[in-house]
Image (spheres, rainbow, N blue to C red):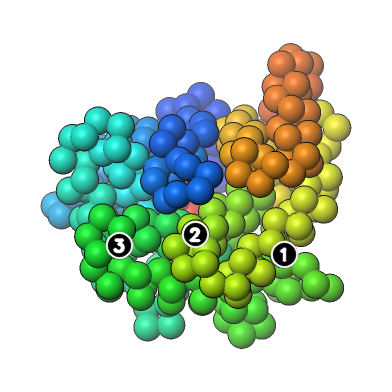
Amino acid sequence: MNKRVQMIKKWISMLFGKNVLAVQQGMGKKYSKTKITGYYNDLTNKVLFTTNLDENGIPVNLSYNGKKVYFPTAIVQYGLGAYDLYLLTSDKSYYDKFINITNWLLNDQEKNGGWDAFERIGQTDCNKYSAMTQGECTSILIRAYLQTNDSRYYEAAIKATDFMLKPVQEGGTTRYLNKKIYFEEYVKSEPDLVLNGWIFAIFGLLDLYKLTKEDKYKTALQSSIYTLKTELSKYDTGYWSCYDQSGKIGSPFYHDLHIAQLKVLYDLFEINEFNYYAIKWSNYQKNIFKKSFAISKKAFQKIITPGQTIIIK
């Protein structure tokens, strides 16, 4: 099947919530402002709606050419969702899934602390490492460490974040510019600064600071929070939120996710800008004309410039 046609079918399935890549993700149900408990976004639907698991219980995705691929970002989100389900239900089967996923990620982590998020699935328009993946893996490793007291998880979490904080010029996933810190989901020569991935990276850094109380993580966290606060206006179109700073409109799924993430950030840090845009973007949702226009523009963008779509489900 033509790759562009597959991309359009994927986007339509995401639009109507028929794709596990875009299941509803609201605010986390068990997270804490001060402790490390549940995750900050509700990823439980990643577990409840994932059907493609290998013989070891690891999620596999399908690429446009029909090949099954292991995508660490999808895998770690499944694991974080399983952990929240364990906290919500006390069902040990979810705990077992959580530990199984964490062990897979532990074994898959490279010596430098990174995970190959994109090269392994055939994506060539960015570096293989992702701040989003690094941050989410940090979060799951820390939770495994707190549950088991196994130092391997602790050490891997430190390596994951230290690698995430390396400058992009040195192979890492953080861009340092004029005393600002940007976490890049897709590391490119010309950064597009995907909003949701940036925030997921912040969550991982927050978890490590909560655990270690080290000044270097506190400084990086404060700098990136400040940077995000000052950059949020660049994601606002006046009728919808943007997926990134290159002008891509957020799909309804990502618009919902942005709102949930900003609500969590406001709860955690009490910074007015996060609440302001969460409310503003929620109001866009309620306006049928703005929502319809945003969906139409997103569809047009997908048809005209589909990008390098690799995973379709």
Q: Please report the residue visible at 78 percent of the width from the left and 34 percent of the height from the top.
A: 276
User: Could you say which is closer to the camera, residue 53 or residue 80?
Assistant: 80
Residue 210's disc is: 2
* Cα–Cα gap, marks 1 and 3: 27 Å
Dot placed on the residue nearer the N-terminal end, 2 or 3: 3
- What kind of element bears circle 1? helix
The nearer-to-camera label among 2 and 3 is: 2
- What kind of element bears circle 3? helix
User: Could you say which is closer to the camera, residue 313 or residue 92?
Assistant: 92
Is residue 73 toward the left or the right of residue 277 in the image?
Answer: left
Disc 3 packing (10 Å; few <14; some 14–19; many ≥20) = some
Q: Please report the residue visible at 78 percent of the width from the left and 47 percent of the height from the top.
A: 232
Do labels 1 and 3 touch, CB within 8 Å?
no
Which amino acid type is shown beneath numbered disc 3?
Tyr
Do labels 2 and 1 touch, CB within 8 Å?
no
Residue 62's disc is: none
* Cα–Cα gap, marks 2 and 1: 16 Å
Dot placed on the residue nearer the N-terminal end, 2 or 1: 2
The answer to whether residue 170 is above or below residue 146 is below
Dot placed on the residue nearer the N-terminal end, 1 or 3: 3
Quarter that holds the C terminus: top left
The spot of residue 27 in percent (x, y) is 52, 34
Which amino acid type is shown beneath numbered disc 2?
Lys
Is residue 9 visible to the viewer in this orientation of the structure? no
The answer to whether residue 110 is above or below residue 33 is below
User: Could you say which is closer to the camera, residue 203 or residue 253?
Assistant: 203
Quarter that holds the N terminus: top left
- What kind of element bears circle 2? helix
Residue 145's disc is: 3
Which amino acid type is shown beneath numbered disc 1?
Ser
Q: Please report the residue visible at 27 percent of the width from the left and 72 percent of the height from the top.
A: 151
